[in-house]
Image (cartoon, rainbow, N blue to C red):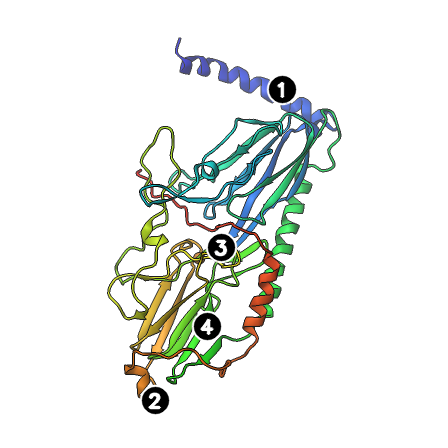
């Protein structure tokens, strides 16, 4: 008899048994408290507003020995569920000998088995959402030993949680429904912190350069410790021909790119198509996304891109700003190649130069920025600096990758 035939034979029997069990459970008071399956969200996102909550929701959960926790991952933002045990956290991104840049296998690939007792590291790996497969990725672990276990997300340094496991037979403090309510409350609190930050924001800073043109200083995104808004803070900005735009990463904890892709050209994706490797290899990052390209002005031939940049307080090697001069009138649309699904895009509208300074449009030898902000406010930069203090030191994450895989069908 084939396996399929066995299954077919036993399915009606199993169904009858489980129906009996369900009616028994419904008739016994308190029987539902024995449910040993728990659910925690790994992140929360709203693609319409570009909001990514970088938190486990709820952050802390108390269960009983032998219970199982399932983490449900958001589709577009990369997270891991990682119990380090006694291990040190490895770097997230590493260079390999042929010069390619890949995710560290220790971070990106699954590690450990279906059970956790605190004695060895266990990692979900980086689940990759396959839109064709439909369901969002999940990660499931059974907890076999009492204790409190902290866990992290490799991509988001502030994304941490705990699972507290009580001895078998203990009464746990909450049921799943209560944890769902706690999760919503935590999420709303985190988002309200971002709203407060936005409300306190000043106007775009503008600085007059020696040649009379203006440098417009924009932010690539806004973050609090638990929320990233994948939006260029001023999505459409009007400038005059000859002006400079400088984007700054200092208010964001996620990496971003500022990338001008010629009309009709497909923007490159971060993850290169992965061959079916056995054993699997960590995803390779596309150099066309990772590295800068083009010169320092527009219009230009081909892609002009900042490449992957990160807040310098999180990665001292990362340039925290990117500047371009816009020589000619026109509408210049750009995207962040890491967050297209979140609608991370902007436009620079360049008008004819109206002032009397003839050097601006023709002189390529731009002098250094001089003076204090002349137009607009001085509110923005002190604010951004104080916000950085919130992030703290020693954060090394590089979260926020665009990980939607192009599936081969
Ligand atoms: Cu982005």
Within 10 Å of the Cα at label 4, are there few (<14), some (14-19), or many (20+) other Cα atoms?
many
Which mark identifies residue 147?
A: none
* Of residues 134 and 339, the one drawn nearer to the viewer in this rendering: 339
Helix, strand or loop at label 1? It is: helix
In the image, 212 versus 78, the foreground residue is: 212
- How many residues crowd mark 1 within 10 Å: few (<14), some (14–19), many (20+)? few
Locate the N terminus and report the quarter of the image it occupies.
Answer: top left
* Residue corresponding to mark 2: 357
Q: Quadrant of residue 388?
A: bottom right
> Regarding mark 2 in the picture, which secondary structure is present there?
loop
| Marks 3 & 4, CB-CB < 8 Å contact | no
Say which element carries label 3.
Answer: loop
233 over 104 or under it: above or below:
below
Which residue is label 1 attached to? 20
Q: Going from the N terminus, do you reach mark 1 or mark 4 first?
A: 1
Sequence-earlier tag: 3 or 2: 3
CA separation in Å, label 1 and label 3 = 58 Å
The local crowd at label 2, few if under 14, some if 14 to 19, many if 20 or more residues have their Cα within 10 Å, is: few
The answer to the question of whether label 1 and label 4 lie on touching residues, with beta carbons closer than 8 A, is no
Q: Would you name the residue on which mark 4 appears?
A: 217
- Work out which quarter of the rendered image holds the C terminus and state it: top left
Q: Could you tell whether 319 is left or right of 365 in the image?
A: right
Q: Secondary structure at mark 4?
A: strand
The residue singled out by tag 3 in the image is 315
């Amino acid at each position: 008899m084939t396996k399929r035939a066995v299954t077919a034979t036993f399915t009606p029997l199993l169904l009858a048994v489980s129906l009996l069990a369900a009616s028994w459970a419904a008739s016994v008071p308190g029987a539902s408290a024995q449910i040993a399956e728990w659910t925690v969200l790994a992140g929360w996102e709203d693609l319409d507003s570009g909001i990514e909550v970088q938190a486990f929701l709820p952050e802390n959960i108390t269960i009983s020995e032998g219970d199982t926790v399932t983490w449900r991952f958001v589709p577009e933002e990369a997270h891991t569920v990682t119990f380090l045990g006694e291990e040190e956290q490895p770097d997230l991104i590493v260079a390999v000998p042929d010069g390619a840049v890949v995710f560290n296998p220790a971070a990106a690939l699954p590690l450990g088995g279906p059970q956790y007792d605190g004695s060895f590291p266990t990692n979900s790996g980086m689940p990759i959402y396959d839109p064709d497969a439909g369901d969002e990725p999940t990660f499931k672990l059974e907890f076999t030993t009492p204790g409190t276990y902290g866990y992290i997300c490799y991509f988001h340094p502030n994304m941490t949680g705990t699972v507290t496991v009580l001895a078998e037979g203990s009464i746990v403090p909450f049921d799943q429904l209560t944890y769902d309510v706690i999760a919503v409350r935590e999420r709303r609190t985190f988002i309200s912190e971002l709203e407060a930050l936005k409300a306190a924001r000043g106007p775009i800073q503008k600085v007059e350069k020696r040649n009379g043109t203006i440098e417009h200083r924009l932010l690539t995104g806004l973050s609090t410790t638990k929320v990233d808004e994948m939006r260029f803070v001023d999505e459409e900005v009007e400038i005059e021909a000859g002006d400079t735009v400088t984007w700054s990463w200092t208010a964001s904890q996620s990496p971003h790119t500022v990338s001008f892709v010629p009309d009709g050209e497909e923007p490159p994706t971060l993850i290169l198509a992965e061959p079916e490797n056995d054993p699997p290899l960590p995803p390779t990052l596309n150099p066309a996304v990772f590295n800068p390209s083009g010169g320092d002005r527009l219009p230009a031939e081909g892609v002009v891109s900042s490449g992957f940049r990160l807040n310098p307080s999180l990665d001292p090697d990362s340039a925290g700003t990117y500047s371009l001069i816009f020589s000619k009138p026109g509408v210049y649309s750009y995207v962040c190649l890491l967050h297209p699904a979140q609608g991370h895009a902007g436009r620079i509208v360049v008008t004819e130069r109206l002032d009397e300074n003839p050097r601006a449009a023709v002189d390529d030898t731009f002098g250094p920025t001089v003076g204090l902000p002349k137009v607009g406010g001085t509110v923005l930069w002190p604010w951004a600096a104080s916000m950085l203090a919130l992030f703290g030191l020693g954060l090394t994450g590089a979260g926020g990758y665009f990980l939607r895989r192009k599936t081969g069908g």
